[in-house]
Amino acid sequence: MALAGCKSLEELKSLSLDALFDTVEEIRKRRKDNTYNTMPVIDGLLIPAPIDEMIKTPLGLDYLIGYTNNDLYAPMMAFIGNRFAKANGAYVYFFDLDAPGDGSAAFHSCDLRYVFETLSGSWRPYGARDREAAAQLAQYLANLARTGDPNGKGLPEWKRASRGRARVLRIAPEGTATGRADYVKMTRNLLTKGEPKA
């Protein structure tokens, strides 16, 4: 499996998209939980082709890409998302704030409760940092929808990715700031976590 053989971020970056997708298939064969058997639905409109094809020929839109530290194939999605972002000037966030309550880490879609500020509808014991992150994410997205720019008064600056540089907004326990995706943590979560529960 290509991913397992990588010992550094540089080695991961050197893998081809084909090698990454081969790794995904290997993991799908070994894992029995549904989390690792999901791919985007080709709807003919927003997703008109398989993702590996769309990376090569994207739609002419402004993109916002987000991934979590225990997302579906997290390190591969981060690598592919960052690569796509650099080529298309997307805004990218890495949600590295673990969901409290059961050790599921920042599982796939846990960031949506923050984006829509619906933390109170969950059994999880969210705290002050969670509420702060939720207010920030909701404001970023409202600003993006209203003006095409997620930035606004009182928010840490979020820059677009540019050719050769993926600028990632990292939402973490210690705060929100430009940072990097933690590929080691994502890989560890990918190989050790089962299907997280919402």
Image (cartoon, rainbow, N blue to C red):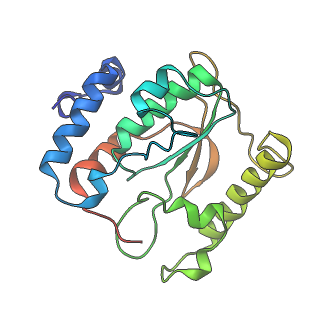
The C terminus is located in which quarter? bottom left
User: In which quarter of the view is residue 127 placed?
Assistant: bottom right
User: In which quarter of the view is residue 119 placed?
Assistant: bottom right
Relative image position of residue 173 (x, y in whole percent) = 54, 58
From the viewer's perspective, tell me whether residue 127 is left or right of residue 9.
right
Identify the residue at horizontal 76%, vertical 44% (top origin).
Answer: 150
Relative image position of residue 74 (x, y in whole percent) = 37, 44
Identify the residue at horizontal 34%, vertical 23% (top origin).
Answer: 17
The N terminus is located in which quarter? top left
Identify the residue at horizontal 74%, vertical 45% (top origin).
Answer: 156
Identify the residue at horizontal 50%, vertical 58% (top origin).
Answer: 97
User: In which quarter of the view is residue 85 placed?
Assistant: top right
Which residue lies most toward the front here?
A: 44
From the viewer's perspective, tell me whether residue 195 is left or right of residue 81.
left
Q: How many numbered circles does the render carry?
A: 0
Which residue lies most toward the left here?
A: 30
Up/down of 88 relative to 181, above or below: above
Up/down of 146 relative to 118, above or below: above
Camera-nearest residue between 53 and 131? 53
Relative image position of residue 58 (x, y in whole percent) = 56, 26
Camera-nearest residue between 22 and 197? 22
